[in-house]
Image (tube, coloured by chain):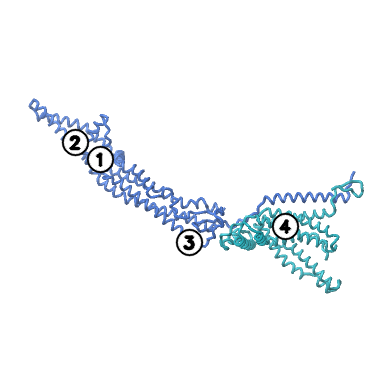
Chain colours: A cyan, B blue
Amino acid sequence: MQARHPSGSRTALALPAWPARVLLEMLLLMILCAVAWLYWLFGRTLPTGALAGAWLLAATPISAVLYRRARRRRRLLLDAYLQPATRLNRMLRGGALLAIRCALPGLLLGLVLTVALLRIPDQQTWLLLLGAAPALALSRAGFAHVLASQASPRYLPELAAHAALLVAGAALLVLLLWLAMNRSYPLLGDVALDRAVWHLVDQEEARSAAMQLLLQLAAAKDGLRLWLGQQLLPVPLPSAAQWLAWLLLLAEELLFVWSYLLMCTGTLLLVQRNDDPHG
Amino acid sequence: MTTLTADSRSAVRSWLLLAVTCALGLALALEMARQLPRQWPSAAQLDISIGDEHYRLDARHLAWLAGFTSAHFADGGTQARALVHAEIDRQLDPVFAAARAALPGWVDWYWSLGAEYMRIAAAGLAAAGVETGDLAAARLQSALFPDASLEQALSSLDVGLAAQLPGLFSELDQAWLEQVTSWLSDLRIPAPLQSGGQGSALTLPPGPLHAAVPDADGSRFAQRLGTSTLAGAGAAAGPTLLSMATARGAGRSARLARLGWLARSGKAAGTAATGSGSLCAPAGTLALGCALVAGTVTFVATDWVLLRLEASRERETMIAALEQALEDWEADLKAGLVRDWEALIAAHTSAATLPIREGFVPARALR
């Protein structure tokens, strides 16, 4: 776009102030997506130590997001019931204990994410994840713009981030489910459950024995899910009810999408510390 | 001169960011669509199927399977060869022993007057353009192998081996299958989910391995082998033996027998003329007849005496040469038979070990 420069002496091609920040966020999230993609490319050849590092790297931003939300909820509670500058208020505002309490689900979600990333079966999923990065940043900026006149300025960034997370997450989930519904799976209709699970588990290999075990557990879960689906819901799908049932079976993607977007949001949060309304 | 203000710098930075973001997104999208994850090469393994069972073998087990299979079927080949040798000896040794025993009789016939004049008659007919064949060779063949004994022995040999070898091969295959399936039982894996879906699986012959050997059907094999062997052996025994014996020294006797007739004829004719002149002294028609009879008798008697003298000198040499020729020919015939059957044994061994040799050489497949 072309805008008149305030000095009036020259014209310059300028973007509004917020796109620069959005562009930075997009760039950052794309770099994060690229790192995750590299992890997918080489993760099975990494030793356990490197994988543990990757797990902590994924869990840290997730835990940060969870900690920030917990502190916000605590702050709202304390503001409602306690005087602002009291000792009790300071003691209960959330410290190490709250951080530990948030780190545990963060570590769990990080583990789910590190395993799920390695088990991404095709390149199309990565194109969707890559597209989710700018979508998340843009929707954050969009919601911040839209909600600016309605929301409390103190919680506007958080509210916008939360709304963006929901919208981008829902869109990503729909697209991933669409991919999952059109993916080719082994035919398990005529085989026993143990044979089906064995073959899916058998395909999972990794340099790290611990990661191999996690991958095989996830594959066993997939084997059970696909076997159940093919035993109980034969294809082709005759009705909307069966479509719905299959969607429910494949809805485990939700956990992956949620942890991935939490990691993205947490990364932005860690980079932009000044957005924290609670100091 | 233009100086960039803070807003201009910000705009430039924004456009630069936009360009970098777009470029990064495009590059990532292109690479993401192209790259596949690197797989960790786990301990080299190979899935094999034996019959309806499926196994997953690592390098150690593959090396064992390759070594065991090779040794097992090499031993089987040795057993099969021993069986072939034993059967050949069992069928042919009595026939050749009888032939050896019959040799002196033929040599005595050869040095007889009848054989002498038969040769003279054959030479005369040959000079007149009538082909009579090698009468001595034909007589030798009928004397040594009466009633087509050699052909019958060869036929029995073919039928017997064609019946025994497939049984031996079947036992070998069964023993291999039992041993392998027993030792690999801990390595059994479930069958693939879809037939043909496991591209790397190696399929070993599931059923009797000897079924894979071409032309192993007993009757057809016996017929093929019998036709070729008999044509070259029994039916041509006489000429072959005489030819070999000639090359080994009996030729001198044979040549003597042929050339000696001229000398003997000259001597006999001279003796006959002298004898007929002294016996039929009176002149006239009777005297001419008497002279002819006396001359003929004297000629034949002289020829017989000379033939006996020559036989007493050459008989043993001729028998020795013919025995040696018979022994050599027997060895050649047995070697040829072993070669024929060796092809079948080699085909079985090859059929049994081919999938392993072509499917995996541990040092190569597991590299």
Label 1: chain letter: B
Nearest-to-viewer mark from 3 and 4: 4
Secondary structure at badge 1 equals helix
Nearest-to-viewer mark from 3 and 2: 3
Disc 3: which residue: B182
Labels 3 and 2 share a subunit: yes
Q: CA distance from mark 4 to mark 2?
A: 121 Å
Disc on the earlier residue, 3 or 1: 1
Disc on the earlier residue, 3 or 2: 3
Q: Amino acid at mark 2?
A: Leu
Q: CA distance from mark 3 to mark 2?
A: 80 Å
Q: Quadrant of residue B224?
A: top left
Secondary structure at badge 2 equals helix
Residue B292 falls left or right of residue B346: left
In the rendered image, residue B128, in percent from the top left (x then y), is placed at 25, 29
Q: Residues within 10 Å of mark 3 (few under 14, many from 20)?
A: few
Disc 4: which residue: A172
Q: Amino acid at mark 1?
A: Arg
Nearest the eye: A57 or A218:
A218
Q: Amino acid at mark 3?
A: Ser
Secondary structure at badge 4 equals helix
Disc 2: which residue: B306
Above or below for A155 versus B327: below
Q: Residues within 10 Å of mark 4 (few under 14, many from 20)?
A: many
Q: Are marks 4 and 2 in contact (CB under 8 Å)?
A: no
Secondary structure at badge 3 equals helix
Disc 1: which residue: B139
Residue lying at the far bottom of the rendered structure: A88
In the rendered image, residue B272, in percent from the top left (x then y), is placed at 14, 31
Label 4: chain letter: A
Q: CA distance from mark 3 to mark 1?
A: 62 Å
